[in-house]
Amino acid sequence: MSVGAAKRGAPGEGAQLTGSVLAVHGGAGNFGRRDRGDAGDRARRAGIARSLRVGIDVLAADGSVVDAVERAVRELEDCEEFNAGRGSVLTARGTIEMDAAISRGTDRGAGAVAAVRRIANPIAAARAVLEQSCHVLLVGEGAEEFARANGIAFCADADLVTDSRRHQLERARQRRRISLDHDGDVGGTVGAVARDARGNLAAATSTGGMTNQLPGRVGDTPLIGAGIWADNATCAISGTGVGEAYIRVAFAHEVDALVRLAGLGLAEACSRALDRLDAVGGSGGCIAVAPTGPAVLRFNTRAMPCGQVGSDGEPEVRVYADE
Ligand code: ASP
């Protein structure tokens, strides 16, 4: 597995050339070493491992690659340690507004929702947009109406809000900051990418956005080509980090273009796209998978809970750049 910007071209890349592979992330951020080994760290590692198992089981049972990434992301949305579903960060108004997207490599089909409220699994709503509508992105009340009409489960606002996110908002307000979900506080945006044994690719991402963001703010997560991409010919990508920077560099499309037009390998393409992000002052990471080879996991922050698993392997889970 290759993890972190410092490990470009790490030994082992290319070891697993074909076959199913699934990778997930739980958000890039700059939380410190003092968190290592604490209860939260253990819970996040366990969440990542569970998500990998759930996703790879779908592929092992010959399920679709879209099912695999949706199930993997749902598992992380249900884990309140992460900034998606329950446990999402709060806006400046103290509300939760979530974005999610799913992208299918077979036909570049995509579905996304933005600024939705009271939905415990926004990724299911994104999938409904992909499969039950002729649109790509629905926002706010329209997205919620569509989700309700398509059988997506709703909950109360209070079911999604946790005490630790309330405290996080208080701290951000005091510092007058809009912060990446785990700049100093851990538990981030979630995403998954996968390839099945036939070479089909898919990606899915879900987030509560950034702490203390303005109500109505939409990040990169639901914007196809910014935070997410899947094309069987090149790669599937799920990004995490400062969304405005991802939008400004068209991050996921940049990785695709570097593979498709410049002929770069996926690992190099991800590193170059992160350099471009860095150049506009953005920080974050991504997970990606190509038609062959293992998944690539890269970040320019101090940490990104993440991991990958192949059809025959035990899940590998990592959090810090130096692991
Ligand atoms: N990219 C997300 C956003 O800007 C945040 C994150 O990945 O942590 O909404």
Image (cartoon, rainbow, N blue to C red):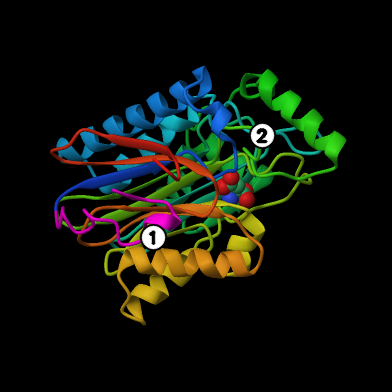
* Residue appearing at x 32%, y 47% in the figure: 66
Location of mark 1 (residue): 109
> What SS does tag 2 mark?
loop
Q: Nearer the viewer, residue 112 or 3?
A: 3
Amino acid type for the residue under numbered disc 1: Gly
> What SS does tag 1 mark?
strand
Side (left or right) of 211 relative to 247? right
- In the image, residue 104 lies in the stretch drawn in magenta: no
**Image position of 114 with respect to 162: above or below:** below
* Residue appearing at x 42%, y 68% in the figure: 255
Side (left or right) of 300 relative to 160? left
Quadrant placement of the C terminus? top left
- In the image, residue 17 lies in the stretch drawn in magenta: yes
Amino acid type for the residue under numbered disc 2: Val
* Residue appearing at x 59%, y 37% in the figure: 31
Q: Which residues are magenta?
A: 1-18
Measuring from the top left, give residue 307's x and y in whole percent: 34, 40
Image quadrant in which you'd find residue 14: bottom left
Location of mark 2 (residue): 89
Q: Is mark 1 within 8 Å of ligand 1?
A: no
Q: Is residue 85 visible in the rendered structure shown here?
A: no
Measuring from the top left, give residue 306's x and y in whole percent: 40, 40
Q: Nearer the viewer, mark 2 or mark 1?
A: 2
Measuring from the top left, give residue 202's x and y in whole percent: 33, 53
